[in-house]
Amino acid sequence: MNWKVGDWCLFEFALHTIKEMEGNKITSVSDGNFQTGGCDLSDRVFPLTIRNKRISDTFEYYSGKFHEIHHVTLNFPDIHNYLVEKWCKAMNSKEDDTVADGEIASIINRVGRFYDEFIEKIRCLETMEVDGVRLFRQK
């Protein structure tokens, strides 16, 4: 795609505008509140289309669900990177988003299973006891 400063785009599953470019490299994007910069963000920038927005909304939903957990020691950077990696894979898929059992659906189902397993492990940790003493405070 031939990007230019001011174009609307999706960056890490959220709506952004391109703020700076160096040649064909996107070096800065903003969501209106925060600006993110780097040598080349182009691999995480996708056109704003209905298909891409629908995929992004799903990943943004899961991202929000992880942040609702409120465990301060969770590895949010790696969790976010995992979601971005899967999001990029879904966004790079050539299929139409209406395919119910295709690559995009498979990726989203995998993220859902990751979330479910994650929650199950958190619940196990929260109820762990040693010699009758709970290791974690109840919420």
Image (spheres, grey):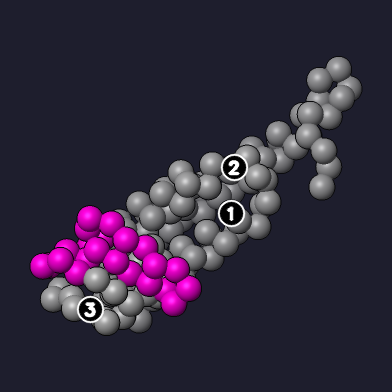
The type of residue carrying mark 3 is Val
For label 2, count other residues whose C-alpha is less than 10 Å away and answer few (under 14), some (14-19) or many (20+).
few
Residue 87, given in percent of the width and then of the height, sits at 37, 59
Question: Which residue is depicted at the point 71% across and 35% down?
Answer: 124
Pointer 2 with pointer 1, Cβ within 8 A: yes
Eye-nearest disc, 3 or 1: 3
* Residue 82 highlighted magenta (yes or no): no
Residue 3 located left or right of residue 97 = left
Is 30 placed above or below 90 here?
below
Q: Secondary structure at mark 1?
A: helix
Residue 115, given in percent of the width and then of the height, sits at 55, 50
Eye-nearest disc, 2 or 3: 3
Question: Which residue is depicted at the point 87% across and 25% down?
Answer: 133
Residue 39 located left or right of residue 84 = left
Question: Which residue is depicted at the point 47% across and 47% down?
Answer: 77
Is 45 placed above or below 137 here?
below
Instruction: Tell me the CA gap for discs 2 and 3.
Output: 36 Å
* Residue 25 highlighted magenta (yes or no): yes
- Quickly name the residue at label 3: 5
Dot 2 or dot 1: first in sequence order is 1
Residue 74, given in percent of the width and then of the height, sits at 59, 42
- Quickly name the residue at label 2: 74
Magenta stretch, residue numbers: 21-43
Question: Which residue is depicted at the point 58% across and 54% down?
Answer: 66
The type of residue carrying mark 1 is Phe
